[in-house]
Image (cartoon, grey):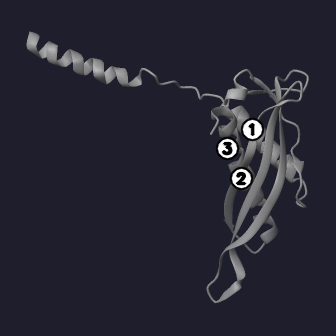
Amino acid sequence: MKRWSLLIAPLVALALSGCAGYRLAGSKPAGMVNVSKLYVPTFENATLEPRLGALVTNAVIKQIQATNAYQIVSESEADATLKGTIGTINRTQWRSVETNTLQTTELLMRLKIDFKVVNKAGVRIYGGKTQATSYVVLDPNWQTSERQLLSETAERLSVILSDDLANGW
């Protein structure tokens, strides 16, 4: 019996040591370590798409709240401010009708933003660029399809941006 316990004890210790350095929470980027409260004003819209700044900002705020990495507060209470500029929005044909290549059946959209996080003194502590891509099958009412595509792309962008802010990647 002692032989088995001498053999099993190191195996149990080895199996349990695999989780020794594991943490459940993400590790914030170096400049964001002391930030727990974040203010997010409406993103600047450098495109010609109306109301896109508000759409992207709302998606980003919801996703940051969902990740629970930062508390979204007013400007006076915040440790830092997340500022964003929507730089470009590209729409391209993803698929076409087999007999008519000019008729689009699926539309691809790519949304690119520049963002920065500044502290109360206005000094940039973190920032970068990010983009998201999504596509939609167009129905006869292509305006509705395109609006849904804008919303879906903004949601994807918000996931990427909140992961970057929460984990640094």
Alpha-carbon neighbours of circle 1 within 10 Å: few (<14), some, or many (≥20)?
Answer: some
15 vs 82, left or right, is left
Q: Nearer the viewer, mark 3 or mark 1?
A: 3
Amino acid type of the residue tagged 1 in the rendering = Lys
Residue 52, horizontal then vertical, whole percent = 85, 53
Alpha-carbon neighbours of circle 3 within 10 Å: few (<14), some, or many (≥20)?
Answer: many
Report the front residue among 77 and 146: 77
Residue 149, horizontal then vertical, whole percent = 74, 60
Circle 3 SS class: helix
For disc 2, the marked residue is 131
93 above or below 51?
A: below
Q: Looking at the image, is mark 2 or mark 3 earlier in the sequence?
A: 2
Report the front residue among 23 and 151: 23
For disc 1, the marked residue is 62
The N terminus lies in which quarter of the figure? top left
Amino acid type of the residue tagged 2 in the rendering = Gln
Q: Nearer the viewer, mark 2 or mark 3?
A: 2
Which residue shows up at 71% across the image and 53% down it?
131
Residue 98, horizontal then vertical, whole percent = 61, 85
Q: How many marks?
A: 3
Where residue 159 is drawn, which disc sits there? 3
